[in-house]
Amino acid sequence: MILPPPFVPESSIFRGVGVGPGTAIGPVHLIGSSKIKYNRYKLTSPEMVKQELRRLTEARESTSAKINSAREALPEEFQSQAGIFEAHLLLLNDPFLIATTEKKIVEDKINAEAAISASVSRIIAVMSGIEDSYIKSRLSDVEMVGQALIAAMQEDSGKGEHYFEEGCIVAAKDLSPAEVASLPIDKVKGLITEQGSKTSHTVIVAQAIGLPTVVGLTGVLSKLEHGDKVIVDSREGHVIHNPDQDATKFYQTRRRSEESFTIEIVRCAHLVALTLDDHKVDVFGNLELVEELPAIMSYGGEGIGLYRTEFLYLTRRELPTEEELFEVYRRVVASAAPRPVVIRTLDLGADKILAVSDTDGARHNQALGLRAIRFCLKNPDIFRTQLRAILRASIFGELKIMLPMISSLEEFLTSKQIIAEITETLRKEGKAVAKYIPLGIMVEVPAAVILVNELSKEADFLSIGTNDLIQYTLALDRANPEVSDLYQPFHPSILRMLKTIIDAGIKFGRSVSVCGDMAAVPQSAPLLVGFGADMLSMPSASIPVIKRLLRMSSYQDMKTMADEILTVSTSQEALSLINSYFGPRFNELM
């Protein structure tokens, strides 16, 4: 671990979980925070007073429209919660709140943001003294409405939550994958969140778009103000608040060094990952959004080893149609051709799909519930629609289908039969389907590891999803920061499982890939190759580094290390062994 320099005060350092190498320096942009920074200024003319009164009115109208839109967009099953919107609308028209604010603008001659902040503070002070639990419970509503008005005023002046300053660092409690994907990456240079883990889907998207990220920073929002300067060291998981000139200079130098190094390795990323003793490893990219495809290709990806198809189902009020899915899949497969594309079928539960009502299921642990292949087999119409689109796209390039969360041979054989039936139906309809489409499975639950020989006989290829395999094997929630330290990829049980899976693939002549996070980590990638994996798939930003590491390594060294690591008893022993093999030679890569 690289510690911050000694001249950085400990009180200014926040520690979380870093994602990928990278340094970002810039002003904080708070999203969803209760604190919005604004300038307070005096009104020096009657015209300015009129302008501020007009801004207040426009902010009320804008906020009211947003609340109404949010209320109307609420799914039918959650309409019972619409009362909160009504309460906020009433507060927006509360005579005391509005009249007090207008009076402060006119008499105190202060701008609208400062006036609404003062009015809200006064109301909260009065209400806090009332011994009534209901009244006290409404304090947060008053504060939220006040902040919404200030946010609307700031947006109007181009300084609100949706205005992103050049080079800013987004800070939030948490963001959804869709929210991260929609950030203006030309302006946003880093991301820090209170929640999340190294393997959450939000982090996966952040990695894919090359955003230096630190997550799991519990309570950090209470220490930050909009516009504060921070340094994000995603390689080590540090965030430095309000750095001085020396700290800023130190990290600016490091960032320039990282950028130079990145340029150097990206320049060679198109080279084949051929080890010093001529062993070839295929290095592919993981794809979530179609827009990521050019980055995967430019960073040297030799294909798509994992195309996550969930994004088209998230946050929509209706299921995507076959034609919508087909057009997206066709575009990906055709654009990647002649490189192969491995499409993973839907890996979500009903709790994440708005178009599927599952209020009962949402109350249960979805990691152990109806998700992935289980959900698809229980919802054959959704499954068949996606499969039809995938099969139709197969003629535009080299396409493979991968089934997630397989835990029994029956699940695989049933899915295989459904695919055969759909293929026959499509051909009868006159729609072309490729003559041969390899069908593989993701090995990511312990049951699949135990049955790996039987599954290998039937599947055309295996792909190891290390993120879920670690989660299910070690019985921990990978998104829970309270147990994040127990998420150990080098746990001896995980290492032995990986070897068992890869050996089974080799025994039955099946290709074995790894598409989880371990494939993208310099400490574990050579280990996986040493075990016998013939393909690694990862976020685009990791491809150049892993290819460089493999080209500078000996396959025999990797095999020797892999054999030796199976004898260790602890995660720390395993990591120490890896570092002893590769640390001294590849310090800048590790």
Image (tube, rainbow, N blue to C red):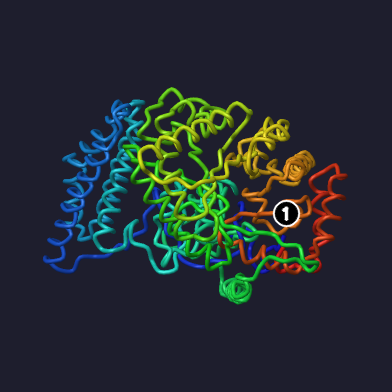
Q: Position of residue 372 (x, y in %)?
A: 52, 34
Residue 253 appears in the rendering: no
* The C terminus - image quarter: bottom right
For image coordinates 17% across by 40% down, the residue present is 93
Question: Looking at the picture, how far across and down is residue 586, in whole percent?
Answer: 76, 68
Left or right: where 243 falls relative to 550: left
Q: Nearer the viewer, residue 94 or 330?
A: 330
In the image, residue 494 above or below residue 36: above
Residue 285 appearing in the image: yes
Q: Position of residue 153 (x, y in %)?
A: 25, 56
Task: Tell me the quarter of the picture where residue 81 sits.
Answer: top left
For the N terminus, which image quadrant?
A: bottom right
Quadrant of res 128 = top left
Identify the residue under disc 1.
524
In the rendered image, the vertical position of residue 410 relative to residue 307, given as above or below: above
Furthest residue in direction top, as rendered: 360
Q: Nearer the viewer, residue 19 or 353?
A: 353
Q: Is residue 553 left or right of residue 365?
A: right
Residue at 55% x, 65% y is: 231
- Secondary structure found at label 1: loop
Determine crowd level at label 1: few under 14, some 14-19, many 20+ residues with C-alpha closer than 10 A.
Answer: some
Amino acid type of disc 1? Answer: Ser
How far across and how far down the image is residue 549, in percent? 71, 65
In this view, the residue in front, 291 or 212, is 291
Please state the total of marks drawn on the protein image: 1
Q: Residue at x 81, y 58 (%)?
A: 558
Q: Does residue 324 appear to the left or right of 28 in the view shown?
A: left
Q: Would you say 112 lies left or right of 295 here?
A: left
